Image (cartoon, helix red, strand yellow):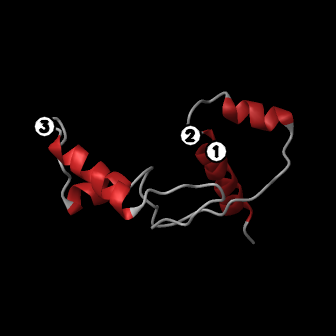
Amino acid sequence: MPKLKPGTIWPTPEEDAAITAAAMSDPDTLPLSDEAFAKLKRVGRPRAAITKERITIRLSREVVESFRATGSGWQTRMDEALMEWIRKHRS
């Protein structure tokens, strides 16, 4: 059972059985296999092989607006620009 939040009300085992029986008796309901259910639980994109670190940084408005104006993926492009700077300025 999932971690309970304050005020969460879960059905009793009897209520859960009645809900399941009603769903299974519905001809429009198709029960999911364990494999199909596992696929449903995956939400969002897959984890990257190399993850990034979430930070808070203060940048000039002009820099942020310029990158945002490039559209979706602007944070990745900002990361690439910083990586390019690092490659050029390594001692």
| Above/below status of 71 relative to 47 | above
Q: Residue 28, percent across and down?
A: 16, 35
Q: Are marks 1 and 3 in contact (CB under 8 Å)?
A: no
Residue 24 or 59: which is nearer the viewer? 24
**Amino acid residing under circle 2:** Gly
Mark toward the viewer: 1 or 3:
3
Q: Secondary structure at mark 1?
A: helix
Q: Residue at x 18, y 58 (%)?
A: 33
Q: Are marks 2 and 3 in contact (CB under 8 Å)?
A: no
Determine the residue located farthest toward the bottom in the rendered image.
91
Closer-to-camera residue (5/15): 15
- Compared across the picture, whether 4 is left or right of 30 comes to right
Neighbours of disc 3 within 10 Å: few (<14), some (14-19), many (20+): few
Image quarter hosting the N terminus: bottom left
Q: CA distance from mark 1 to mark 3?
A: 47 Å
**Looking at the picture, does residue 67 appear above or below residue 36?**
above
> How many residues crowd around disc 1 within 10 Å: few (fewer than 14), some, or many (20 or more)?
some
Q: CA distance from mark 2 to mark 3?
A: 44 Å
Q: Secondary structure at mark 3?
A: loop
In the picture, the disc for residue 73 is 2
Which residue shows up at 21% across the image and 61% down it? 35
Q: Classify residue 42 as left or right of residue 17.
A: right
Label 2 crowd bin: few (<14), some (14–19), many (20+), radius 10 Å: few
Residue in view at x 61 percent, y 51 percent = 80
Kindly identify which residue carries mark 3.
27
Q: Amino acid at mark 3?
A: Pro
The label shown at residue 75 is 1
